[in-house]
Image (spheres, rainbow, N blue to C red):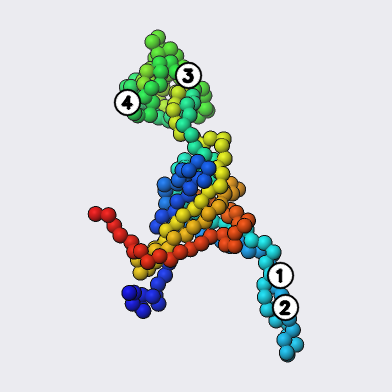
Amino acid sequence: MPTSEALYTKRRVRNAIINLYDIETGLILIQNRPATMELDDGLGGNTEITEVDGQGYEVKIANNFKERKPTVTLNFKGSNLDITALQRNRQTQITTATLRYPWRQQVLKAEYAAVGTGKIGNGITEDADTRGATLSETGETIALTQQSFATFNSATPNSFAIGADYVRRFSDDLLARRAFVILEPQKDFTARTMSETQLGFLELNGLCFNSDNTLEIIEVPNLFVNPEGGGLKPGDDTTTVTLDVATIGKCEPWRIFEITDEIFCDD
C-alpha cells in the first residue's frame, strides 16, 4: 500500500511512450518518442448563463459551450523523414529516383580517388552528367566545363571530369588557385520518401509516469493529422505535429486510466 505522503505528493511527471497506430494499414507510425504531448479540449463559443441574485447583482451560474474541437499536439526533439511525413499527413514508401547529389569542396589536388562502398559518391558512373560552378578570379560565379574522363586535359581552364565511383579530376588553374567548387553529379538511388497517399484515421496510445512510479495509460481512439504549418526545417530543435480528434458519437475525446502497475527495467 502506498503511504499517505506518496499519495498526497503524487504527480504526473513525464510521458514515457506515445504510439500512433494507423487504423487502415495496421502499422505503428512513429518510433521516436515525443518530448512532450499536449491534449487540448478545444472548447469554444462559450455563452455565459447568468441570473440576478438577491442583492441585484448579475451572477454567472453556468457555461454553455457551442463547440468542442479537441487537439493533440506532439513536440519532437529534432526531426526525421517519419516525423516530417506525419506532420504533412503522408505515408512513406520505397522508391527509385535519379537525383543530383550536392557537393562542395576545395580543390587541393589534381585527382581524388574513388569513393568506397557504402559511402556517398560510390556508384556514380564514369562521365555521369554533372553540373559544376566556381568563383572566378574576379569573384564572379562561373560554370565549370565537364570533360570526358578518359580524354581529360588538365590544361583546359575551369574544367573537371568524373570517373567511376566519383573519381574527380580538376584542371590546372583550379588547383593553382585552390578553388572552391560546387558539383552536382547525377546518380540513381533507391530511397525512402514521402508518398502522395494521405494517412487515414489514427489511434494514440500513451504511457505516462507518475512520481510514485505508477503509470497512466492515455487512449485517443480516433484522430487525424492537421497538416497546417507543416514543412521542413533541417536543424530545428523541435518539430510540432498537430492532430485533430474526431469526437462524433463519443462523450469524451480521450480517456485516462491510472493503473497500479509500476515501472520496471529489463536486466
Gap between marks 3 and 4 measured at Cα? 21 Å
Rendered view: 23 above or below 14: above
The residue that mark 4 highlights is 117
Mark toward the start of the polypeptide (4 vs 1): 1
Q: Are marks 4 and 1 in contact (CB under 8 Å)?
A: no
Q: Amino acid at mark 3?
A: Asp
Q: Amino acid at mark 1?
A: Thr
Rendered view: 225 above or below 178: below
**Discs 3/4, front:** 4
Residue beneath the point at 35% across and 64% down:
261
Mark toward the start of the polypeptide (3 vs 1): 1
Give 70 or 188, whichever is nearer the viewer: 70
Give 148 or 76, whichever is nearer the viewer: 76
Rate crowding at label 1 as few (under 14), some (14 to 19) or many (20 or more) other CA atoms within 10 Å.
Answer: few
Q: Say which quadrant the C terminus sits in.
A: bottom left
Rate crowding at label 2 as few (under 14), some (14 to 19) or many (20 or more) other CA atoms within 10 Å.
Answer: few
The residue that mark 1 highlights is 47
The residue that mark 3 highlights is 129
Give 4 or 169, whichever is nearer the viewer: 4
